[in-house]
């Protein structure tokens, strides 16, 4: 019984750690947190010896170098859980998009310190709008002072982050 309580506590901790970490570490920065619930309660199974999160096709990525643009939300030791099933996008979501499909070469050089080889970007959506090409999003790295210079249209978003483990 005690072990099950610990496992349940760990599962709850994992689910709220993303928001709690942002609030504790980034008190001096305004970070918009998504109100969309990407992992529903029915997708979480708690057992005595493990916690299983299921939904469509989740993928996991571990970062081995510091991503200054998303620090402190995502660090070199973070494990990012993301989904390529993008049915709902909200302001506050962290998304992965291909910058070469959304920005000019000049905008890429202006945005990134080392733009060579940069294709996929992992940043938070901070605004939503509509133009002649449909719905678009403005993104920003949590560690950056200014928004990214390009509009990111929904069809340019490759994946959406559903969880970050520390």
Image: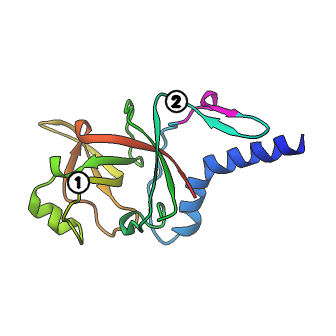
To which quarter of the image does residue 112 belong?
Answer: bottom left
Q: Is residue 47 above or below residue 95?
A: above
Q: Secondary structure at mark 1?
A: loop
On the image, the x and y values in percent for residue 158 come to 30, 40
On the image, the x and y values in percent for residue 46 come to 72, 35
Q: Quadrant of the C terminus?
A: bottom right
To which quarter of the image does residue 132 belong?
Answer: top left
> For the residue carrying disc 1, how many other residues have a C-alpha within 10 Å: few (<14), some (14-19), or many (20+)?
few
Q: Is residue 58 above or below residue 34?
A: above
Question: Residue at coordinates 33% horizontally, 70% vertically from top-left?
Answer: 145
Q: Say whether residue 13 is left or right of residue 92.
A: right
The residue positioned farthest toward the right in the image shown:
1
Residue placed most toward the observer, 109 or 119: 119
Question: Residue at coordinates 40% horizontally, 63% vertically from top-left?
Answer: 70
On the image, the x and y values in percent for residue 37 come to 52, 37
Which of the numbered marks, if any, corresponds to residue 55?
A: 2
Q: Secondary structure at mark 2?
A: loop
Which of the numbered marks, if any, corresponds to residue 145?
A: none
The magenta-colored residue range is: 39-45
Looking at the image, tell me whether mark 1 or mark 2 is earlier in sequence order. Answer: 2
In the image, is residue 152 part of the stretch drawn in magenta?
A: no
Q: Say whether residue 127 is left or right of residue 37.
A: left
Judging by the rendered image, the residue that carries numbered circle 1 is 119
């Amino acid at each position: 019984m005690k072990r099950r309580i610990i496992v349940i506590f760990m599962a709850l901790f994992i689910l709220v750690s993303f928001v709690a970490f942002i609030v504790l570490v980034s008190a001096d920065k305004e970070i918009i947190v998504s109100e969309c619930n990407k992992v529903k309660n029915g997708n979480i199974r708690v057992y005595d010896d493990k916690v299983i999160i299921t939904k469509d096709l989740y993928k996991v990525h571990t970062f081995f170098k510091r991503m200054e643009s998303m620090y402190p939300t995502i660090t070199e030791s973070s494990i990012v859980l993301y989904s390529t099933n993008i049915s709902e996008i909200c302001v506050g979501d962290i998304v992965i998009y291909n910058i070469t499909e959304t920005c000019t070469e000049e905008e890429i050089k202006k945005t990134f310190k080392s733009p060579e080889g940069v294709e996929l970007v992992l940043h938070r959506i901070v605004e939503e709008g509509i133009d002649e090409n449909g719905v678009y999003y403005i993104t920003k790295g949590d560690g950056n002072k200014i928004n990214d210079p390009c509009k990111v249209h929904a069809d340019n978003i490759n994946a959406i982050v559903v969880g970050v483990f520390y």
